[in-house]
Amino acid sequence: MPPTPSPARYNPFMMLLHWAMALGLATAFGMGLYMVDIPGITPFKLKLFNWHKWLGVTLFAVLLVRVVVRAGSKLPSYPASWAGRLMTLVKTGHWALYAMMLVTPVLGYLYSLAAGYPVVWFGVIELPVLIHKDPALKEVFEELHELSAWGLVILVAGHVLMAFKHEWMDKTRILGKMIPGLKVDKQ
């Protein structure tokens, strides 16, 4: 039996997960930037920190679902012209995105625990306390969480810029693979 050809687009559930993740990451990053600049400890600031943590846990869960769905899905093929070094860069960039989407919330979780604040998802499900309050670790995890968040922003920006470059400069119609209604090149 001949192999099944690759689909032209990602399946609708993968598209939904991709765009939900994009919206969630933008929201989490914006909220993080905003809340750390609020002086002192206020009820509003504490509320934002909780929302930020809930969103981080949710994004972590969505990422796990996304990995499982991706592993079980037939994916669109990359353009044939993307051989050699370009393919290595594309795949490395995608894996780096997945790694940072995994690492960033884990570091935020550890930062919260080291600061002495357990994470209670939506105020209902208490996540395990893996480490106890530790001011020295708090500083380390705070810095690592911030650095990983900025690293993730840089990777996402690179991902978006390269998608636009391929679409508009190289005239390789790839945005339609992840955006319904747009034209996609036949492989």
Image (cartoon, rainbow, N blue to C red):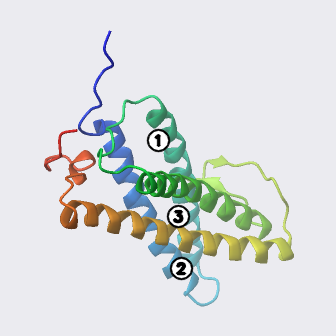
Residue underneath mark 2 = 35
What's under tag 3, amino acid-wise? Trp
Could you tell me which residue is drawn at 30 percent across and 31 percent down?
6
Residue underneath mark 1 = 66
Label number found at residue 51: 3
Badge nearest the viewer, 2 or 1: 1
Is disc 2 surrounded by few (<14), some (14 to 19) or many (20+) residues within 10 Å?
some
Say which quadrant the C terminus sits in. top left
Say which quadrant the N terminus sits in. top left
Q: Compare residues 119 and 2 and report the one nearer the observer.
A: 2
Q: Secondary structure at mark 1?
A: helix
Q: Secondary structure at mark 3?
A: helix
Left or right for 7, reference 24: left
From this viewpoint, which residue is outermost toward the front? Answer: 84
Disc nearer the start of the sequence (2/3): 2
Label number found at residue 113: none
Could you tell me which residue is drawn at 36 percent across and 35 percent down?
75
Q: Secondary structure at mark 2?
A: helix
Q: Compare residues 135 and 42 and report the one nearer the observer.
A: 135
Relative to 136, say whether 152 is above or below. Answer: above
Would residue 115 be seen by someone viewing this image from the given angle? yes
Left or right for 153, reference 78: right
Residue 78 in percent (x, y) is at: 33, 44
Is disc 3 surrounded by few (<14), some (14 to 19) or many (20+) residues within 10 Å?
some
